[in-house]
Image: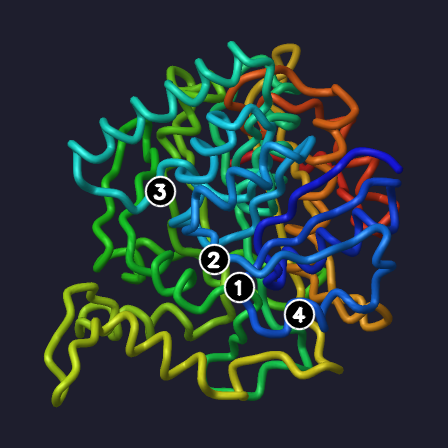
């Protein structure tokens, strides 16, 4: 038997990561989750390879015992667990991979931001000291988007524009609801992404966009994606300035943004919802209960079958990076794109495939000794170690050079 992997979380992405691990390697996997159907969900796999432990991930003592027995941990939990489990893995002396941010782009408290950065620096120090790898943001977005951006930027002598797009959408035949949208990941996660500020670079200057302004018409632009046959609305999501600094292009880039895409009409609806307080986090009294507007909105939408995929419906995911600048003295534009749809044979949604399979690949890269020690992001991972390997799942990246005359 090969190495031992501890998979924490058997949600949508965790299920895809487990499937890939069992079918692409000789590892044994211990799955940790508190769901009542854990063992029934694992019955499709050989018991010699896969076992389950019913455990709440907040039980750090019990989780630490399991971590110390593993060669690598895959953390596939909601984002509020990311920092805690990264810290716990470093303490236990085991490498880890996750698909979420250690420091949430939506965090606005300066003191908390400073505290989290200190904690991340300590995790990095501890991991290097112990010879561990803590690989974060290794999913779709964040994850593959950063790999594609780094690849495109690396082709340029000087970067003037960098536009990054990421989305999960219902396919053409899975859109018959008022929002033309279905949830392919955590409903509350989508709500939180809709209620956080953004930063873009426009004409070389930083533009701060408040949460209530993200969906305003002046901050939304259209992107025609021929392969989908639709013009998508794109709204700012995340901190482009942070990545401009990480990519080393802050001094040259004039236009840069990270965007989420939706079908037309989505932004107008959510602008009203955000400005009407439906995504507020402060709990309000409702009868004898106390409920935050965001929790209510997530529960309301998440409880309706019309906003979830049926077994025969396809979702699609899109990552597109459009970089413009100069190469050998000539104006150059390069577009990298990944477009994927649900695999109806296995049943895995495209979001499961692009996040879960990337997570499992990250674990294998760690086990194979392909990565450095310390706290890493996709920018520390070789493109050639990732994109060709995902091809075995029919996940392909295209590259185009396009005219750039404007």
Q: Nearer the N terminus, badge 1 or badge 3?
A: 1
x 16%, y 77%: residue: 290
Q: Nearer the viewer, mark 3 or mark 4?
A: 3
Task: Measure how far apart labels 3 and 4 are at the Cα level.
Answer: 26 Å
Q: Nearer the N terminus, badge 4 or badge 1?
A: 1
The residue beneath circle 4 is 315
Q: Residues within 10 Å of mark 3 (few under 14, many from 20)?
A: some
The residue beneath circle 1 is 34
Task: Measure how far apart labels 4 and 2 are at the Cα level.
Answer: 30 Å
**Are dots 4 and 1 in contact, CB under 8 Å?**
no
- Check disc 2 and report its element: helix, strand or loop: loop
Q: Nearer the N terminus, badge 4 or badge 2?
A: 2
Q: Nearer the N terminus, badge 2 or badge 1?
A: 1
Q: Which mark is residue 104?
A: 3
Q: Nearer the viewer, residue 249 or 91?
A: 91
Left-right relation of 197 to 167: left
Q: Position of residue 363 (x, y in %)?
A: 70, 35
Q: Nearer the N terminus, badge 3 or badge 4?
A: 3
The residue beneath circle 2 is 56
What is the count of numbered marks?
4
**Are dots 2 and 1 in contact, CB under 8 Å?**
yes
x 49%, y 65%: residue: 262
Q: Position of residue 118 (x, y in %)?
A: 29, 22
x 40%, y 55%: residue: 235
């Amino acid at each position: 038997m090969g190495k031992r992997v501890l998979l924490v979380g058997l949600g949508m992405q965790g299920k895809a990561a487990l499937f890939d691990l069992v079918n692409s390697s000789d590892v044994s996997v211990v799955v940790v989750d508190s769901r009542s159907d854990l063992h029934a969900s694992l019955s499709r796999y050989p018991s010699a390879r896969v076992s389950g432990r019913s455990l709440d991930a907040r039980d750090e003592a019990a989780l630490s015992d399991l971590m110390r027995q593993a060669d690598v941990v895959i953390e596939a939990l909601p984002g509020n667990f990311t920092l805690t489990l990264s810290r716990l893995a470093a303490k236990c002396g085991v490498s880890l991979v996750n698909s979420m941010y250690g420091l949430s782009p939506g965090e606005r408290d300066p003191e908390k931001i400073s505290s989290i950065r200190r904690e991340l620096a300590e995790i990095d120090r501890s991991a290097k000291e112990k010879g561990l790898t803590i690989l974060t943001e290794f999913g779709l977005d964040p994850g593959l988007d950063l790999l594609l951006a780094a690849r495109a930027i690396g082709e340029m002598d000087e970067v003037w524009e960098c536009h990054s797009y990421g989305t999960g959408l219902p396919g053409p035949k899975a859109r018959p609801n008022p929002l033309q949208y279905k949830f392919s990941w955590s409903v509350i996660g989508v709500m939180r992404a809709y209620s956080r500020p953004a930063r873009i670079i426009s004409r070389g200057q930083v533009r701060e966009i408040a949460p209530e302004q993200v969906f305003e018409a002046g901050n939304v632009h259209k992107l025609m994606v021929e392969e989908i046959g639709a013009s998508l609305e794109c709204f700012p999501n995340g901190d482009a300035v942070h990545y401009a600094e990480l990519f080393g292009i802050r001094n040259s880039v004039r236009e840069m943004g990270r965007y989420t895409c939706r079908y037309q009409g989505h932004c107008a609806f959510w602008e009203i919802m955000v400005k009407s307080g439906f995504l507020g986090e402060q709990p309000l009294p409702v009868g004898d209960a106390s409920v935050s507007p965001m929790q209510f909105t997530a529960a309301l939408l998440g409880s309706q079958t019309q906003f979830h995929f049926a077994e025969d419906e396809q979702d699609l995911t899109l990552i597109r990076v459009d970089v413009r600048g100069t190469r050998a003295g000539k104006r150059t534009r390069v577009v990298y794109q990944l477009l994927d749809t649900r695999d109806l044979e296995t049943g895995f949604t495209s979001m499961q495939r692009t996040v879960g399979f990337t997570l499992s690949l990250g674990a294998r890269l760690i086990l194979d000794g392909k990565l450095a020690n310390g706290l890493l992001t996709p920018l520390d991972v070789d493109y050639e170690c990732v994109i060709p390997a995902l091809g075995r799942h029919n996940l392909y990246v295209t590259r185009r050079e396009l005219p750039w005359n404007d």
